[in-house]
Amino acid sequence: MSSRDAVPFYPKTRYASRGREAALAAQHSPLGNRLLQALPPEDYERLRPALEPVPLPRGWTLYHGGDRHQHLYFLTAGIVSRRHVMANGAKTEFALTGSEGVIGVASILGGESLLSEAIALTTGFAYTLEAARLEHELRHCKPLLRLLLRYAMALVTQAGQIAVCNRHHSVEQQLCRHILSSLDLLHSDHLTLTQEMIADSLGVRRESVTEAARLLQQAGLVRYSRGFITVLDRSRLETRACECYAVVRREYARLLPPASTTGATGLRAIDILRACGDAGSRWRSGASGGYCAPPQ
């Protein structure tokens, strides 16, 4: 089974109660995305009907290198890895994206595709916007254009810093950076990633990641077991990481709007009701098989 045909993580079942539907819809409101959250209310309300909910199963490929970007993905949960792919199949990660950003930003930069791929590292959720609709919105919504351009600048900063990191820093330092960045995107101290997945992201041998993880565990910084990573001492882990983690984090804080506590939990009542009515009905709909399948 290819990543494009991966089974969505939402089962094809009807939910037992509207209370559960409401909780799920509220959890995955578009306001969980930092960029959408920062839009003026009138712009958000105009854009909201065009946003389609989509689950992101772990390992699913949002797009391959050279694919035309027909949708933008505004993430509300999970992590997506951006990777360049070489002619021999070798891959190296150049950026991580979570609920602070969007996949498909090339659409606003004059390009319809990139020579890279985007893969869901963890189970997640997003709202898609058709690229054709984006062109219309950018003519009428200057705040959206400014947000996307600032995000593009932050993304370029991250890609450049990771390129330097891969060339000049040890695998242990890169692993610390990758763990810390991933946990920031998940807002958690726990991470589910196998050593093989991490090695694939960093473009190094799995044995190198195994050794680096062993050293971090021996130092009491993390606990690693069967692909499950728990950070035990974050301050010391940050000290062990190279400066690249702090540089990227600082630039994202400078360029992007601050995350609001109303994004994921304290949602506006109107958005919760709309999510329950729209997304909930889609998830129950027989036409969609009980879930919103990723666009093909």
Image (tube, helix red, strand yellow):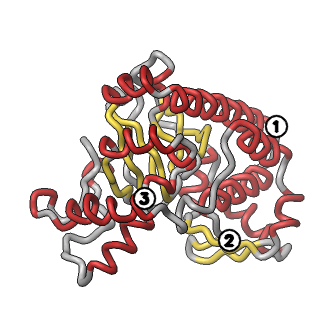
N-terminal-most mark, 2 or 3: 3
| Element carrying mark 1 | helix
> Closer to us: mark 1 or mark 3?
3
Which residue does the numbered mark 2 point to in the structure image?
A: 189
Single out the residue that lies furthest toward the top: 110
Local crowd at mark 2 within 10 Å, few (<14), some, or many (≥20)?
some
Location of the N terminus (image quadrant): bottom left
Pick whichever, 116 or 147, lies toward us.
147
> Closer to us: mark 2 or mark 1?
2
Local crowd at mark 1 within 10 Å, few (<14), some, or many (≥20)?
few
Alpha carbon separation for disc pair 2 and 3: 23 Å
| Element carrying mark 3 | loop
Which residue does the numbered mark 3 point to in the structure image?
A: 29
Location of the C terminus (image quadrant): top left
Pick whichever, 292 or 145, lies toward us.
145
- Residue 292 higher or lower than 169, as above or below: below
Q: Position of residue 294 (x, y in %)?
A: 29, 49
- Residue 290 higher or lower than 169, as above or below: below
> Closer to us: mark 2 or mark 3?
3
| Element carrying mark 2 | loop
